[in-house]
Image (cartoon, helix red, strand yellow):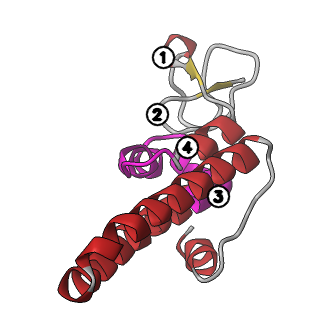
Amino acid sequence: MPFCTHCGSQLSEGDLCPTCGRKADQFRPQLPVNTAAALCYIPGLVLAIMFLWWNPYRRQKIIRFHAWQAILLQSFWIAVVVVIGMLFSLFAAPLWFFIERLLHLAFILLTAFMIIQTYRNQTVVLPYLGAFAEKSS
């Protein structure tokens, strides 16, 4: 379905956008909602932030929710690795190597699970992070 690149509203038949009045030659097709929401979970925070910024994606509540949840999940992950890394480097540095690998594997599996479930249009609300993401979106 085509969407207006300026205001994000869905287009119907005709030459002009019903909301902002732009000409039809300025319209581009949009990614499906499930694809855009699933792309938010790709590690790196860039896509999630971009989907919060781009029209018409930022106008859709489900994409905003997944973008915020992905940002919070990845920020939480960074904080956990830094804090636990500092603690283990002080007390048990050799053990940190194995624990870090297990934590990274858990994060990769969780991220893959979130991408797959979101692409299937099944919303997974993570404990604590999901509640905050619902308030933010």
Secondary structure of the residue carrying tag 4 is helix
Residue at image mark 2: 6
Look at 60% across and 83% down and name the residue there.
128
Q: Is residue 56 magenta?
A: yes
Which of label 2 and label 3 is nearer to you?
Answer: 3
Residue at image mark 1: 26
Write down the region rendered in magenta: 42-66
Q: CA distance from mark 1 to mark 4?
A: 17 Å
* Label 3 Cα neighbours within 10 Å, binned few <14 / some 14-19 / many ≥20: few
Name the amino acid, label 3: Lys
Position above or below: 129 against 100: below
Majority secondary structure of the magenta segment? Answer: helix
Name the amino acid, label 4: Tyr
Residue at image mark 3: 61
* Label 2 Cα neighbours within 10 Å, binned few <14 / some 14-19 / many ≥20: some
Secondary structure of the residue carrying tag 2 is loop
Q: Is residue 82 left or right of residue 61?
A: left
Position above or below: 108 against 129: above
Which of label 1 and label 4 is nearer to you?
Answer: 4
- Along the line of sight, the residue nearer the viewer: 95 or 76: 95
Residue at image mark 4: 57
Secondary structure of the residue carrying tag 1 is helix
Name the amino acid, label 2: His
Pinpoint residue 130: horizontal percent, then vertical percent: 62, 74
Location of residue 30 by image quarter? top right
Q: CA distance from mark 1 to mark 2?
A: 9 Å
